[in-house]
Image: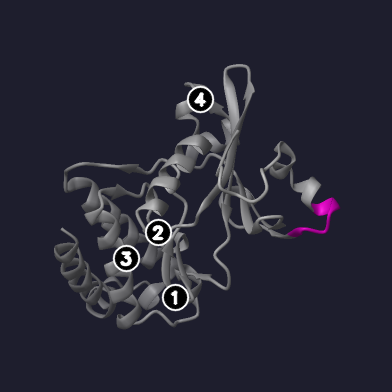
């Protein structure tokens, strides 16, 4: 287990057990994330989010929440904890990492991560479904993505569900498999293409790509280019 050494209370292994929180009436809610692997907690260090890593895609039915063991430093939870800690120190709008752990099961392992909750936030996907996604919000999203790209941050799953709209601005969450890159443009373009596909999938502009380009994507990219240039 790894954790933030500056916390006023050291996390215990039990913190990764939902039933432990539930027995203390500290489990706010569950759901969200892949396979419902997210739980919202009232912890001794404040409101937190507990995420149990689960596979997606065609591997999900085969391995579920198990990953092939390739060493402690490459375990999903530890890697994301380290990345979040680095981004948080840099002042980027990400949730503060609290603790992470892995559990070995022969050639496999399972992983968990606890981060500080971003209170009173909605996902951008929820904003889109509520038909409140406009050019102004698109510009904020473009500037947010540019800020991370200017810092060399490659988000492996940039989509409308991983952008939070909160008091004080937007936040980016879920950095599983994310990394910091020194150079390159292909990964930035891939991030943006993935984000655009997610907008259409969620239902932005009634799934009309031409309308999305005109009403959302054009202002988003204009703000992205301006912010990216300023961040270099």
Q: Is residue 70 above or below residue 1?
A: above
Is 26 inside the magenta-drawn segment? Answer: yes
Residue carrying label 1 = 168
Residue carrying label 4 = 72
Give the label on residue 159, or none.
2
Q: Which circle's residue, 2 or 1, is located before the other in the chain?
A: 2
Q: Is residue 121 above or below residue 19?
A: below
Near mark 4 (Cα within 10 A), the count class, few <14, some 14-19 or many ≥20, is some
Range of residues picked out in magenta: 22-27
Residue carrying label 3 = 144
Residue 70 falls left or right of residue 187: right
- Say which quadrant the C terminus sits in: bottom left
Q: Residue at x 38, y 44 (%)?
A: 178
Q: Quadrant of residue 134?
A: bottom left
Residue 142 screen position, x and y as percent: 27, 68
Residue 6 falls left or right of residue 27: left
Judged from the image, the secondary structure of the residue bearing numbered disc 1 is loop
């Amino acid at each position: 287990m790894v954790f933030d050494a500056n916390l006023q209370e050291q996390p215990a292994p039990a913190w990764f057990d939902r039933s432990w929180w539930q027995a203390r009436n500290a489990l706010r809610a569950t759901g969200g994330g892949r396979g419902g692997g997210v739980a919202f907690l009232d912890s001794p260090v404040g409101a937190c989010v507990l995420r149990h890593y689960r596979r997606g895609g065609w591997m999900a039915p085969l391995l579920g929440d198990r990953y092939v063991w390739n060493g402690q430093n490459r375990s999903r939870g530890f890697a994301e904890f380290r990345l979040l800690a680095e981004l948080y120190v840099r002042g980027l709008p990400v949730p503060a990492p609290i603790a992470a752990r892995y559990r070995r099961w022969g050639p496999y392992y399972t992983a968990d991560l606890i981060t500080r909750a971003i209170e009173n936030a909605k996902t951008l996907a929820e904003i889109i479904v509520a038909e409140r996604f406009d050019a102004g919000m698109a510009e904020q999203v473009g500037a947010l993505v540019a800020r991370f790209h200017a810092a060399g941050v490659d988000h492996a799953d940039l989509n409308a569900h991983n952008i939070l709209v909160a008091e004080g601005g937007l936040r980016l969450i879920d950095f599983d498999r994310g990394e910091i890159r020194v150079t390159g443009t292909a990964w930035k373009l891939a991030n943006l293409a993935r984000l655009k596909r997610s907008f259409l999938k969620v239902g932005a502009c009634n799934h009309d790509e031409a309308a999305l380009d005109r009403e959302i994507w054009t202002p988003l990219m204009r703000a992205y280019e301006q912010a990216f240039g300023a961040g270099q």
